[in-house]
Amino acid sequence: MPQKGMRSLCFSPTRSSSPSTSQVSHISSPSRFSFSPSSSRSFADEVMDKTLERAEPMFMKWNPDSTTFSKVTSLFYHSKNEAKDFIKCVNNLQKAMRFLASENPSSEKLASAQNLMQIAMKRLQKELYQILSMNRAHLDPESVSTRSSRSSALSNFSDSDFEENQESEIVEVEDVSTIAMSDLRTIAECMITSGYAKECLKVYKIIRKSIIDEGIYKLGVEKISPSHMNKMDYEVLELKIKNWLNAVRVAVKTLFNGERILCDNVFASNESIKDSIFSEISGEGGVILFSFPENVVKNTKKSKKSPEKVFRVLDMYSSMANLWPEIESIFALQSNSSVKSQAISTLIKMGQFVRESLSDFEAGILKNTSKSIVAGGGIHPLTIEVINYLTLLGDYSTILTDILADMAPPVRSSLPELLFGNSDSIEMYPEDTRVSGISTRLAWLVLVLLCKLDSKAKSYKDISLSYLFLANNLQYIIVKVNMSNLKNLLGDEWLTNHEKKVKQFASTYVKLAWGHVISLIPEDPTAVKNVGVVKDCFKKFNAQFEEVYHKQSVCVVADTKLRDEIKLAIARKLIPVYREFYNKHKLVLSKERNLGSLVRFSPEEIGNYLSDLFFVVVGTESYASSSSSPSFSRSGIYIRGSSH
């Protein structure tokens, strides 16, 4: 009987014990077959007899319980053509059993066929195990994930591929993993359509889940209970965090992605099975992987808080956020809901932790009650701590934009009157709603810091030193902003406004610290003609310059650019008028016996003294401005510069 005719019979059975002529005509074409309606049952038996006749020798040969040969030899590795015939025999037997069951459910041949089918399924179950076990290296997730994407892999393993590959001998140069995946797909489809899905999936799950679990273990990711994590030293936990950061990318892009590709190909013909088996294989490992950051957050909340811990959480959040398209694709279906739900929960918890940490950090600045002042008006440790923290936050701007999207904007009324009561300093905080959340938040934290520095500046008994302190600290902030991603976040306008503020602070310092010395020189040197008045001017200037210089010599200006600008500002105000007065009256006083004590400083010496100012470094961090600036030495460059 032609195969096409049998296939038609198998898929169009009739259960009627006394079929009509039209029914028999539908079952078998009269042009091909010559039998009466009463012979239909014997025809089904005949189909089964012929099918058993072909299948039994093949199945018994490869019965895993019959001979040593069948126990130790793999059918699919022994002969691809014979494996192809074995699969065809299974499929034909299955069709013949269905046809006979529809015509004669009580036939004894069904029991014989079922026994033979069980032998065949046992063989295929063994083949499945052997292929999975022997090809662990070729079917490892890395090999599978790197050779193709899920979509391209599905197209590469169409139904026709198996047929084409089996028609000829497999040459040595063919890709081993491609052959193994094709064989696995063939076996899986055969067992599932034959009603042995449970046996097939059991073997597949045991082998492949062990690979996922082993992969997670080798990546150093382990299941840690919250109670155990709470007992860890933070140094140990930080090492585990760094290890997780290295592992999560490999796990998602290689381990789970590769397993997803393999499942999609082996069980391509059955959507529900491929999704459920992938979920069973990867679910436990996925939950362990994605629950780790959430447990870290819980641990960090309970332990002693420190600002730097937020960066470890941001690192983990960034890793998961960057991998989210792959995570969502791999674990997209309902069967993987536990893994995806865990990943979402972890991202939410980490976002909450970051927002709470920023609020705690802001509160920490405002609560800083240290009464100590920095000698010489240098950089305050709080400034260094806060701005370093903010520059690090700036490196996470993309992630923070997402995390801070729903965070309430800061409230201006929570700050005291700003910067010596200068109401226009409130403009340092951008109110433009177009500014992103991260930019607004960082600008606000800088403003909180400036307000705290303002209150600390008032602790200086010398008011001029308080302004130098503010200039120093604000300049430090500006330099750090310019050298980091904060420059892009805060913007040019922010920088321009704050640079103007530094100049105002510096100018006020020069006026308060050196104004009295400068005022001792008559504005019009030619107007003073009395020798006694001239002597008195020099005496007062000498005394006042020495006093102020001694007082200001312990001041600190760490930034080279600001240091030079302040010294140049002092020199331009002092040296030109002093030189003119000095040159005008030097000859008149040259006849005096005590000229050395009377005129103690030449203009060049004044310049050299000014050049030596602000180099003392006390309780501050030395740094160099990124901006170019003129260099000064003891060579009297102030005098030469001031003559223009």
Image (cartoon, rainbow, N blue to C red):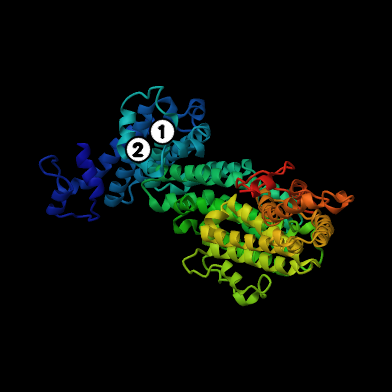
Q: Nearer the viewer, residue 51 or 237?
A: 237
Dot 1 or dot 2, earlier in sequence:
2
Residue 203, image x, y percentages: 51, 43
Residue 204 visible somewhere in the drawing: no
* Furthest residue in direction left, as rendered: 31
Tell me which amino acid carries mark 2.
Asn
Tell me which amino acid carries mark 1.
Thr
Residue 290, image x, y percentages: 58, 54
- Badge 2 marks a residue whose secondary structure is helix
Q: Which residue is mark 2?
A: 156
Q: As drawn, is 420 to the left or to the right of 553?
A: left
- Mark 2, Cα crowd under 10 Å, few <14 / some 14-19 / many 20+, is some
Please give the label number shown on residue 84. Answer: none
* Furthest residue in direction top, as rendered: 172
Q: Nearer the viewer, residue 55 or 257?
A: 257
Which residue is found at the position 38% from the left and 28% from the top? 80
Q: Is residue 509 above or below residue 160?
A: below
Q: Is residue 242 above or below residue 84?
A: below
Residue 92, image x, y percentages: 31, 39
- Badge 1 marks a residue whose secondary structure is helix
Residue 602, image x, y percentages: 78, 48
Which residue is found at the position 64% from the left and 47% from the top? 641
Q: Nearer the viewer, residue 173 or 149?
A: 149
Marks 1 and 2, how far apart in space? 9 Å
Which residue is found at the position 40% from the left and 44% from the top? 150
Give residue 177's quadrant in the image: top left
The N terminus appears in which quarter of the rendering? top left
Asked if labels 2 and 1 touch by Cβ distance under 8 angstroms, the answer is yes
Please give the label number shown on residue 178. Answer: 1
Residue 5 visible somewhere in the drawing: yes
Q: As drawn, is 245 to the left or to the right of 612?
A: left
